[in-house]
């Protein structure tokens, strides 16, 4: 392993005293965060309404999986091209176009639903259209963070972005559940479409003179291959991305599992589905705020969070009672969000600015782009063998991937696992320590 990979923490720029909300000192980031909170609330309302609409139209968990897969298929197919665009052009201008397109698609689905003409193929088509826009929006939005706050606060801003997204998840599912029960899914789609006015306003009000200057990649041939070679030659990037691929493909299929638990295990309604999402969001917000206070981005935390996330999913799948399942949703949210923010921040901080768009596109491609594979697979397993088996299989795959990546990182980094049966104040039960030199080699 290279010296960078062997380091337990990604390099952190020095800055002034850190606080949980230090990035909000920046006016441009405040505008970005405020607009994001409104549009994220609409996005969560739309997600809940979309999943429930598909389930209502088809009665099939597999169809919910197909919808999710279509939304993320473009990221799998074209994700790296989105990264090239993000590296070449001004990210603020890109985001103005992508946010407007997302708003138009949301309003289209609202019109179809409210008029009573919506069919499942309409939902499939709009989900695919959103995926195409996301190909460009996601890496641009991820890489734009450093232009707003600078390298010193990027880890804090990434964590606050996650807290923002998950805070909206506290509001969106609850409101969506109430709207769907009272007046139907169409009004949730309408709010989502209109909510994109907030980030568009924030982007237009930004002071471009206060944005940090970041080198943009010139047009040229072979930029996709250049990005892949860049990642392949850096273990501190490749292994977090590999682990993210497994987690994103097999362990983040909550629309499939939670709708199946509501529909088939607990025989609930849209309100229960909204409650499940809200409880996970509570844990996710807690995880994001804890991450915002963290001073370093450690590889061991990344692996531990992934392993704990997978094991909690497995335990929840086998929960003997409703209240046990409910109590486990917040811890699942904490561990899942901790993994996500740790992976995101460590990759951004370890990447050259001129390559950041392509690297973050690859990160998002394996995280959400694996859903077109994992969504239908997990949907088929869930529909064929039941909600509990589907959830259990996703959790066990995540835990196994974390264990394997952890062992590889420890071996390549010259570390071994030490178990101390008598832990004390300065001694941990389980710790990674350097391997002792081989006696044979010394001889």
Image: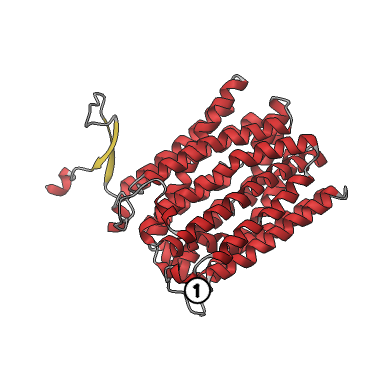
Residue 374 x %, y %: 62, 46
Image quadrant containing the N terminus: bottom left
Q: Residue furthest top?
A: 321
Q: Is residue 383 above or below residue 92?
A: above
**Front residue of this view, candidates 107 and 394:** 107
Vertical placement of residue 117 versus 260, above or below: below
Residue at 40% across / 45% down in the picture?
20
Identify the residue position indicated by label 1 in the image.
Answer: 223
Question: Picture coordinates of residue 278 (x, y %)?
Answer: 60, 35
Disc 1, SS: helix
Q: Does the rendering let one see residue 350?
A: no
Camera-side residue of 96 and 56: 96
Give 79 or 173, whichever is nearer the viewer.
173
Q: What residue is at 36 percent from the left and 49 percent from the top?
A: 297
* Residue 412 seen in this snapshot: yes
80 on left or right of 418: right
Residue 164 position within the rendered picture, expressed as x and y whole percent measured from the top left: 53, 47
Q: Residues within 10 Å of mark 1 (few under 14, many from 20)?
A: some
């Amino acid at each position: 392993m290279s010296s960078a990979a062997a380091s337990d923490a990604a390099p952190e720029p020095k800055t002034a005293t850190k606080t949980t909300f230090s990035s909000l000192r920046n006016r441009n980031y405040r505008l970005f965060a405020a607009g994001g909170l409104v549009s994220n609330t609409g996005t969560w309302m739309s997600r809940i309404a979309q999943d429930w609409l598909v389930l209502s139209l088809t009665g099939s968990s597999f169809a919910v999986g197909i919808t999710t897969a279509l939304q993320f298929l473009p990221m799998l197919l074209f994700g790296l091209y989105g990264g090239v665009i993000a590296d070449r052009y001004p990210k603020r201008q890109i985001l103005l176009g992508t946010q407007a397109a997302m708003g138009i698609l949301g309003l289209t689905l609202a019109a179809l639903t409210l008029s009573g003409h919506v069919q499942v193929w309409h939902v499939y088509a709009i989900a695919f259209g959103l995926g195409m826009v996301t190909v460009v929006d996601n890496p641009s939005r991820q890489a734009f963070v450093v232009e707003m706050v600078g390298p010193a606060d990027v880890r804090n801003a990434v964590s606050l972005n996650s807290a923002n997204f998950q805070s909206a998840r506290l509001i969106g599912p609850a409101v969506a559940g109430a709207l769907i029960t009272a007046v139907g899914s169409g009004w949730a789609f309408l709010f989502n479409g209109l909510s994109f006015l907030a980030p568009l306003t924030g982007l237009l009000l930004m002071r471009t003179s206060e944005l940090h200057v970041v080198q943009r990649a010139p047009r040229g041939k072979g930029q996709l291959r250049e990005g892949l070679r860049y990642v392949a030659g850096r273990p501190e990037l490749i292994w977090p991305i590999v682990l993210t691929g497994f987690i994103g493909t097999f362990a983040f299929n909550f629309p499939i599992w939670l709708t199946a638990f509501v529909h088939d295990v607990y025989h609930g309604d849209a309100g229960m589905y909204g409650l499940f999402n809200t409880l996970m969001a509570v844990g996710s917000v807690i995880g994001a705020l804890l991450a915002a206070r963290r001073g370093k981005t450690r590889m061991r935390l990344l692996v531990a969070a992934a392993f704990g996330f997978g094991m909690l999913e497995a335990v929840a799948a086998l929960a003997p009672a409703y209240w046990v399942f409910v109590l486990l949703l917040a811890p699942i949210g904490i561990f899942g969000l901790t993994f996500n923010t740790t992976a995101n921040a460590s990759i951004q901080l370890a990447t050259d600015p001129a390559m950041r768009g392509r690297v973050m596109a690859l990160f998002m491609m394996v995280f959400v782009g694996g859903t077109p594979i994992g969504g239908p697979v997990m949907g088929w397993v869930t529909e064929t063998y039941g909600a509990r088996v589907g959830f259990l299989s996703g959790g066990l795959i995540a835990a196994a991937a974390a264990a394997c990546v952890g062992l590889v990182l420890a071996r390549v980094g010259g570390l071994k696992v030490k178990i101390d049966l008598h832990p004390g104040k300065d001694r941990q039960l389980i710790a990674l320590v350097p391997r002792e030199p081989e006696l044979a080699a010394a001889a």
